[in-house]
Image (cartoon, helix red, strand yellow):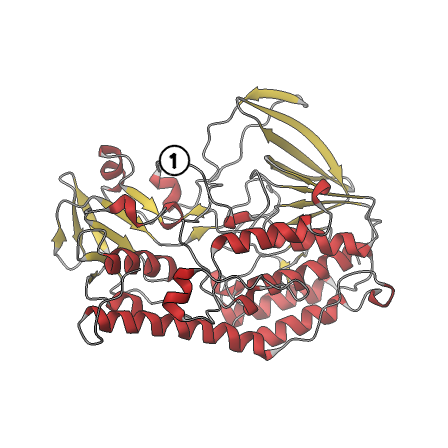
Amino acid sequence: MTGLPVKRVAVIGAGPAGAIALDALVRERAFDIIRVFERREDAGGCWIADTKRPSTLSNFASLAGRTADGPLAIPERLPAQTAKSDQPRFSESSVYPYLETNVDSVAMEFSQEPIPDERSALSVSLHGSGTPFRHWDVIRRYVKGVIYDKGHQDLVSYSTTVEKVEKIGAEWKLTLRESGKDTDYWWVEWFDAVVVASGHYWVPYIPAVEGLELFEKARPGSVLHSKHFRGRDLFKDKRVLVVGASVSAADIAFDLANSQTAQTPVHVVTIGHAANGYFGGEAFNHLHIENHPSISHITEDRTVHFIDGHSISNVDHIIFGTGYSWTLPFLPQVPVRNNRVPELYQHVVWQKDPTLLFVGAVGAGLTFKIFEWQAVLAARILAGRAMLPSVERMKEWETERIKAKGDGPKFTMVFPDFEEYFEEVRALAGEGDTLNGVGRKLPRFQREWVRSFMEGHDLRKRMWKRINAEARGEGGIKSRL
């Protein structure tokens, strides 16, 4: 229980986590005001495509030090109108035209809202008529539908960034900035509780590499993060180095190599780095991919030197698929530690104040479903229909998890304990008043979700293995994406 009457709730973000949080809150029928603030122009979060190329990268020291997304200076007196801010906020998405989900749709969808049964021609050609993957626009429309199909659209303010959240007395003060064409408008709103559903796949992490800033400065656009990849065509006949051994690096390197759009071989930094636990490293075994160890330094003649002493000359582009930095520039009271948010009980409840809750503060795996369970728990807590353990017990939960998972990104990974986590969150949320049509009812965990999740990974790995064999002349005509 929050211990306080909660009637005004703010939600930060209208992506998958924010959309389901909004629906969970509305269905509790316990709040006078629910407001969602989304800095993009529409709902969908990281599934919204951008209409123009992303800005070039700079200030690599801050990207490497995970300090790039700093807070904006707030006008002394509010409301106020200021010149439009030009500070990078990294709000662009990682969508490119032919991007598909890499997880079975069954494992992604919310329990009461099935993902549309729409399959792209590309996905069918790669995985057969029963392909479980969906084009990015299907997911964008799906997330938007959770808001619009249920009539919640009037509760969302778009192009509005939450710049600061602070607890003053018993209330939460939100400083807001609406971004116009040439100016920014600033104002303040007050709430009893805040749900943070802003995601953590926004601010690119690019490791420190000697000479990288000069490499980019000499030819702006030479250095990209995987979130800035907009398709293979921009790299036609270019010498490309991809850095990373996980999912995004695998997809990009394989795409460039198999299509032979970029110069071949496509160079990839994977040696000495662990492949993604779900997808493995089969994508990097393509005939037209050459694998390398970590970069040592880059010289002014655009030569990339590796730690084993060899080098590649005349490199045109370096694409980093090296993950993201978790930042909360709007929440000075909540520090980020080791790329995770500490003091979150069950990854949801801020132990110091249960009127601050998070939806989506977990790593990959059954993510949309986890968001739903977390959203219902958050809504039930704020509606006074869920009981929380003591602060001491919440702290013990975190201590025990740190011992088991470590005090870093692995702390947020629910895999392989999906069933235990879903059922514990469901028990905490309770039934609410669903018999009278109040609140979202959470079903029991189904192991078939995990089966679909893992089988989707196997399907992608088999696709890579088949095409890699074809490229080596072992299976007939070579496939091209």
Label 1 crowding class (10 Å Cα cut-off): few <14, some 14-19, many 20+?
few
Residue found 82% across the figure and 66% down from its top: 434
- Compare residues 330 and 282 and report the one nearer the observer: 282
Q: Tell me the amino acid under the disc marked 1.
A: Ser
Residue 446, by quadrant, is bottom right
Q: Is residue 8 above or below residue 359?
A: above
Residue found 52% across the figure and 78% down from its top: 451
Q: Is residue 59 visible?
A: yes
Q: Position of residue 252 (x, y in %)?
A: 32, 56
Residue 436, by quadrant, is bottom right
Q: Position of residue 296 (x, y in %)?
A: 20, 52
The residue tagged with tag 1: helix, strand or loop? Answer: loop
Locate the N terminus and report the quarter of the image it occupies: bottom right
Residue found 57% across the figure and 51% down from its top: 141
Residue 322 falls left or right of residue 453: left
Q: Which residue is mark 1?
A: 55
Q: Position of residue 408 (x, y in %)?
A: 48, 60
Q: Position of residue 319 (x, y in %)?
A: 30, 49
Residue 185 falls left or right of residue 355: left
Q: Number of labelled discs?
A: 1
Residue 419 falls left or right of residue 442: left
Q: Is residue 417 visible?
A: no
- Compare residues 180 and 394 and report the one nearer the observer: 180
Q: Specify the farthest residue to the right.
A: 436
Locate the C terminus and report the quarter of the image it occupies: bottom left
Residue 480 falls left or right of residue 379: left
